[in-house]
Image (spheres, helix red, strand yellow):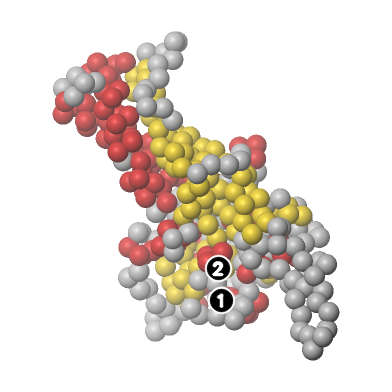
């Protein structure tokens, strides 16, 4: 084996798909999108475009005989436009580490340890951003759950669309203080508000308080803890009213609003990534700063969380 630089970068390229799987499997929403095939890799571009999949302003109507068709307001070009958000995670080896690991076995152990540590940091960074409202890091973070399914759905923009004037860009928001006695009724009523034919929420994302109330409200007979993939991935899961509910948050993480639950129809949610920036190394070799006894490789991500049907998503909050 030639040297530690070549070993690390080669391992990063070889394991980039495995790193992506680890990061995408670290959050219940991304895990669900992976299972549904809603992790999308784009060849490039400056934004992710998603056609509007729910718009009550459609002009099609019923007609009789020779009735004229109204086509003046037809607009099939309206689309949500999501910025490409960029993240990175350095993998660094200082000179002392490099000189202390000259043997092939020691070198491989060091490379694996460095990649494992970097992947762990990247997993937490992406998961925390996924819970946010897109304002983190000066607006550079992902358009996360708090923005996609907002507690103030008539304010601001989503995907470049003004929510104050366009109802198709708004989600449903229910302001109720949930408790163990009313949580089932509240969830059932909210699900009914975002059900369209056979389409309904399939994933509920809860903070610690709402999770506690749902858990307490369900009897041992009602509570279903099926051995599904989400559970196998380590997520706490309950199934109620046809929806898989997961607890998202806990120690050392950015959390959702206290006593909140987001009901997601994941058929219309994707996690879009740019090819060659989907947890790949930035360059084919390590870089050495002129003022440091160290070498760096950078894992990069260009992506965003996108939704094409906000009206089919809901949040319950206190």
**Most extreme residue toward the front, as rendered?**
66
Residue 117 placement, left or right of 42: left
Q: Quadrant of residue 108?
A: top left
Residue at numbered disc 1: 199
Q: Is residue 230 above or below residue 102?
A: below
> Residue at horizontal 81%, vertical 60%?
165
Residue at numbered disc 2: 265
Residue 212 placement, left or right of 67: left
- SS state under label 2: loop
Q: Is residue 35 above or below residue 222?
A: above
Query: Crowding near pointer 1: few (<14 within 10 Å), some, many (20+)?
Result: few
Q: Position of residue 161 (x, y in %)?
A: 73, 54
Give the mark nearest the N terminus, 1 or 2. Answer: 1
Q: Quadrant of residue 238?
A: bottom left
Q: CA distance from mark 1 to mark 2?
A: 8 Å
Q: Position of residue 295 (x, y in %)?
A: 37, 20
């Amino acid at each position: 084996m030639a040297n530690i630089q070549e070993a690390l970068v080669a391992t990063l390229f070889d394991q980039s798909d495995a790193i992506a799987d680890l990061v995408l499997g670290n959050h219940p929403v991304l895990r669900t999108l992976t299972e549904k095939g809603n992790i999308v890799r784009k060849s490039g571009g400056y934004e992710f475009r998603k056609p509007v999949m729910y718009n009550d302003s459609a002009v099609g109507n019923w007609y009789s005989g020779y009735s004229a068709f109204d086509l003046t307001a037809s607009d099939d070009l309206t689309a949500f436009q999501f910025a490409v958000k960029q993240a990175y995670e350095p993998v660094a080896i200082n000179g002392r580490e490099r000189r202390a690991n000259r043997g092939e076995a020691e070198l491989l152990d060091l490379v694996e340890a460095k990649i494992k540590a970097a992947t762990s940091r990247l997993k937490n960074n992406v998961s925390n951003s996924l819970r946010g409202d897109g304002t983190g890091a000066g607006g550079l973070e992902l358009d996360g759950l708090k923005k996609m399914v907002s507690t103030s759905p008539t304010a601001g923009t989503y995907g470049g669309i003004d929510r104050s004037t366009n109802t198709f860009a708004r989600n449903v928001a229910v302001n109720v203080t949930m408790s163990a006695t009313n949580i089932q009724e509240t969830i059932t009523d909210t699900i009914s508000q975002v059900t369209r034919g056979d389409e309904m929420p399939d994933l509920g994302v809860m903070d610690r308080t709402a999770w506690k109330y749902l858990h307490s409200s369900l009897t041992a007979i009602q509570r279903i803890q099926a051995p599904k993939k989400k559970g196998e991935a380590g997520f706490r899961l309950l199934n109620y009213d046809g929806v898989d509910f997961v607890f998202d948050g806990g120690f050392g993480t950015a959390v959702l609003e206290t006593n909140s639950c987001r009901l997601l129809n994941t058929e219309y949610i994707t996690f879009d990534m740019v090819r060659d920036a989907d947890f790949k190394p930035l360059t084919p070799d390590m870089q050495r700063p002129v003022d440091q006894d160290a070498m760096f490789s950078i894992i990069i991500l260009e992506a965003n969380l996108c939704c094409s049907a906000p009206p089919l998503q809901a949040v319950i909050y206190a």
